[in-house]
Image (cartoon, rainbow, N blue to C red):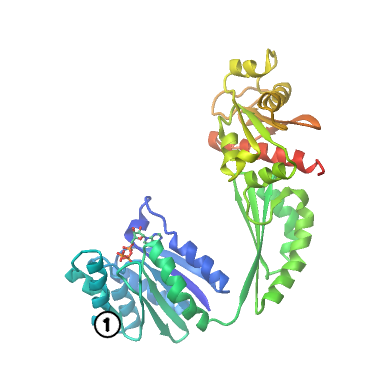
Amino acid sequence: VNAEIIAVGSEMLTPQRVDTNSLYLTDQLNALGIEVIFKCVVGDDRALMAATIRTAIERSGLVILSGGLGPTEDDVTRDAVAEALGRPMRYDEAIFEGITAMFARLGRKVAENNKRQAMVIEGAEVLPNDRGTAPGLWIPIERGGVLLLPGPPRELTNLWEKQARARIEAITEPKVIRTRWLRVAGMGESDLDQLIAPVYTKYVNPATTILAKMGDVEVHLRARCETAEEAEALLAEVAPPIEALLGDRIYSRNGDPLETAVGHLLRDRGATAAVAESCTGGLLGARFTDAPGSSAWFRGGYLVYNADLKRALIGEFTEDPVSEPVALRLAAAAASKAGATYGVSVTGIAGPDGGTEENPVGTVWIGVAGPQGAEAKRFRFPGERSRVRTLAATYALDRLRQALIATQI
Ligand code: ATP
């Protein structure tokens, strides 16, 4: 079966709230070999919801709704599903007694409104909710089923785990999904695609997706088969040629972010790092310290935004602050003054002002100094200020990574 997810709640049609339940559910469904082919957010409107549900049922075997099971007038998910299926609802005294008991334990009196939560659609199984008042409902239908889950994420995940998953497993043909996840740095999305497309376009299964975000590119391979062995065999055929093309551009195969991958390379070599950064204004240090355990390999650094502060760190210089010699000296000083094995420097022009003919906005020099010497590289990052800064921090981490993997241990 294929699945659809309908997130119910007008608040998620505002910029303040995001539907995260569908991400959780998609992950869970994929693990069962079920593909999500459509999802949407619908406001608390019964007619709109009923129409949405009708369309979903025609298209997909499994329809999951989250939210709108509360006691108030605008919680209309139950009514809308009953309408869409053309089934009546009945009042279930046992559910109401359960809700009453839960309120009593909290020292509160149940409201008349809560009777709405004791309404059950004909043919539905009630899924008890031990973290809230609204039970879930599971309604088997001809080609699959309709599942209603409460909106609060901690209730939804709990009901999924304890009640819903087993019921859905029972209606699915045995399909298994196995994935490979490669994270790549130092390379743009289109270059990467050009490089590996000749391999992955030959296969529909596994499906290959390339996701790019600010200098960080991910390649996902998803094999969907009858058995785990078949899925693994498919991945074993397609992944190695892709990995060979990408080589040491791949920094992680287990989902670790770049700063963690770099941190572990430092740790494995018994090495430490320090930074001297200008246009990134602390972003690079922040990235290093995003990695859990970073105190074991990151010593700290120098935020030398102003030229006088750069001089205080490296001594007098006459060159442009955005230049190779300054980047080299900053990297070397970061290492020596902080007592670190490696120093990483960033000096550039994030814009929107300050660009020159020689150094237009987006020009960034990144230096790395270590036991094997120092080197610096000039980059020209596209985009506005925040993008230039983020890319500079990412590429600085990657330059250090390159230096580390060139050092055998
Ligand atoms: P309750 O019985 O608690 O009223 P409910 O099923 O009526 O549950 P909603 O009222 O729709 O759920 O939502 C309750 C809370 O859960 C809201 O604060 C909402 O922000 C959150 N929530 C609802 N749907 C989602 C979603 N799809 N993703 C993330 N959070 C959600």
Q: Nearer the viewer, residue 153 or 74?
A: 153
Residue 330 image position (x, y, % from top left):
68, 24
Residue for point 68% across, 34% down: 273
Confirm whether residue 314 shows in the render. yes
In the visual, does 312 lie left or right of 401? Answer: left
Instruction: Name the quarter showing ligand 1.
Output: bottom left
Residue for point 62% across, 37% down: 393
Residue for point 25% across, 64% down: 106
Residue 188 image position (x, y, % from top left):
67, 46
Q: Quadrant of the C terminus?
A: top right
In the visual, does 406 lie left or right of 32? Answer: right
Q: Residues within 10 Å of mark 1 (few under 14, many from 20)?
A: some
Residue for point 65% across, 57% down: 254
Q: Amino acid at mark 1?
A: Met
Q: Secondary structure at mark 1?
A: strand
Q: Nearer the viewer, residue 363 or 241?
A: 241
Q: Quadrant of residue 230?
A: bottom right
Respond yes or no on whether mark 1 lies under 8 Å from ligand 1.
no
In the visual, does 42 lie left or right of 4? Answer: left
The residue tagged 1 is 89
